[in-house]
Image: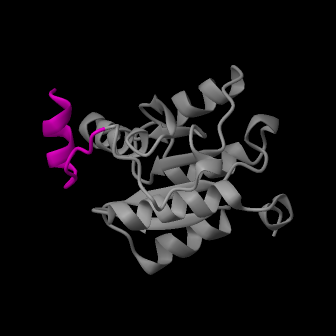
Amino acid sequence: MDLKISGQIAGLETIPKTCVSKHVPLSIMNKPILIIDDDRPVRRALRLLLESHAFDCKEADDGLEGLTLLDEGLSVDVILSDCHMPVINGVNFLKALAYRVSGEGVPVILLSGNMTKEMEQIAKQAGAFAVMAKPYDPRELLETVSRACHRPISQELS
């Protein structure tokens, strides 16, 4: 699928890589991010958005693949995960991540197309750094990722 079409599907306009956002500090550029979503066009649109703001992205189709990548040594600073996926959903991914050294302290931002207050509460209890509804506001997503990259370790344990 054409990447420009992918961006349109997710409600984003593609942004040239030369247009690095003024909202993303230089200190977090090139931070590795894992994007987990079973919807390939949405995953690609997220990747386009983040890479156009100088983040380094890796992708996984579902929570199991994400856990496998982390278990195989992939080191990331932030994880963006869809909530509703086959095999392992976002909340179960969070729970499984808590038992892995490779995921210790990594902030996870959950995205959902049908967010409820109950789902948000469950996700936060499972350790989500943030929960965002789809379609997301690109600026809000970038600000949330930026906050996740700067989060002190002491806050990760609370």
Q: Residue 148 appears in which quarter of the rendering?
A: bottom right
Specify whether 153 is left or right of 131: right
Query: In this view of the protein, which residue sits in the foreground, 137 or 90?
Result: 137
Specify whether 66 is left or right of 117: right
Where, quadrant-wise, is the C terminus in this rendering? bottom right
Residue 14 part of the magenta-drawn span = yes
Tell me where residue 34 appears, x and y as whole percent.
Answer: 54, 38
Specify whether 46 is left or right of 94: left
Query: In this view of the protein, which residue sits in the foreground, 143 or 103?
Result: 143
Residue at the extreme right:
154
Query: In this view of the protein, which residue sits in the foreground, 17 or 96?
Result: 17
* Total count of labels: 0
Q: Residue at x 86, y 64 (%)?
A: 154
Q: Residue at x 41, y 54 (%)?
A: 21
Q: Residue at x 38, y 60 (%)?
A: 112
Regarding residue 93, the answer to whether it shows in the image is: no
Residue bounds of the magenta highlight: 1-16
Tell me the colour scheme of the image: one colour
Tell me where residue 126 appears, x and y as whole percent.
Answer: 66, 62
Say if 19 sits above or below 156 in the image. above
Regarding residue 16, the answer to whether it shows in the image is: yes
Query: In this view of the protein, which residue sits in the foreground, 138 or 127?
Result: 138
Q: Residue 135 appears in which quarter of the rendering?
A: bottom left
Residue at the extreme top:
72
Tell me where residue 4 appears, x and y as whole percent.
Answer: 16, 37
Residue 104 part of the magenta-drawn span = no
Where, quadrant-wise, is the N terminus in this rendering? top left
Say if 69 sits above or below 50 in the image. above
Tell me where residue 45 appears, x and y as whole percent.
Answer: 29, 42
